[in-house]
Image (cartoon, helix red, strand yellow):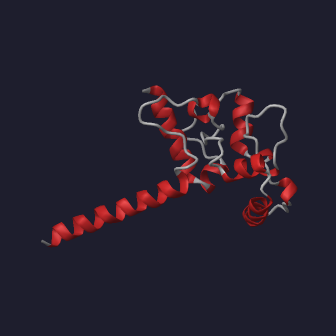
Amino acid sequence: MENRRKFLKGVLGISAGLVAFTKLNGANCYSTATLRPDINAMSFCCLKCDPQCKIFNATLNNDLNAKLDLADRWNKEFGIPFTTDDVFCYGCKAEGKPQNKAMLKCSVRKCAKEKQITSCAVCPDLEKCDKDLWGKWPGLKENALKTLKELNG
């Protein structure tokens, strides 16, 4: 009976963790069960650039309240002064569009552009890559590795 309780408690803990992770990261992670990932339609780190992304949505809708909130969060997170004029994103692959301060400092974006690859999911060095973005947001690297796996079937 004691082993059964431990097992159920462990399963419930893992399930709760997965639900929380999905709610935090799932909206911006590209993954489908039936379709092959379209690496051209995602950022270099394999995030989807769509209206579900808070920054992308605030840019598309010129949402001042969302921009104020994001500027405050970015000031704390990146230690760089951001104003609402600095809070915008058209996606890190958008040619001819301005890039925000954080994007200009993104080591993953810089590396992918230098290697002239469309996504980290096609990089042969992804598994051993230790760029700072992956350390700050481990779920991003997990998603990129998952995308790599989906691409390789």
Q: Is residue 124 visible to us here?
A: no
Q: Residue at x 69, y 34 (%)?
A: 112
User: Quarter holding the C terminus?
Assistant: top left
Looking at the image, residue 11 lies above or below residue 42: below
Q: Is residue 50 visible to us here?
A: yes
Q: Residue at x 82, y 43 (%)?
A: 99
Q: Residue at x 74, y 60 (%)?
A: 66
The spot of residue 125 in percent (x, y) is 58, 34
The spot of residue 121 in percent (x, y) is 56, 33
Q: Is residue 47 left or right of residue 5?
A: right
The spot of residue 89 in percent (x, y) is 76, 46
Q: Residue at x 52, y 43 (%)?
A: 143
Q: Is residue 14 left or right of residue 81?
A: left
Front residue of 127/31: it is: 31
How many numbered tags mark residues here? 0
Asked which quadrant contains residue 123, the reply is top right
Front residue of 127/122: it is: 122
Looking at the image, residue 93 lies above or below residue 84: above
Asked which quadrant contains residue 82, the reply is bottom right
Q: Is residue 12 left or right of residue 96?
A: left
Task: Looking at this view, name the residue that lies furthest to the bottom.
Answer: 2
Looking at the image, residue 132 lies above or below residue 93: below
User: Quarter holding the N terminus?
Assistant: bottom left
Asked which quadrant contains residue 77, the reply is bottom right
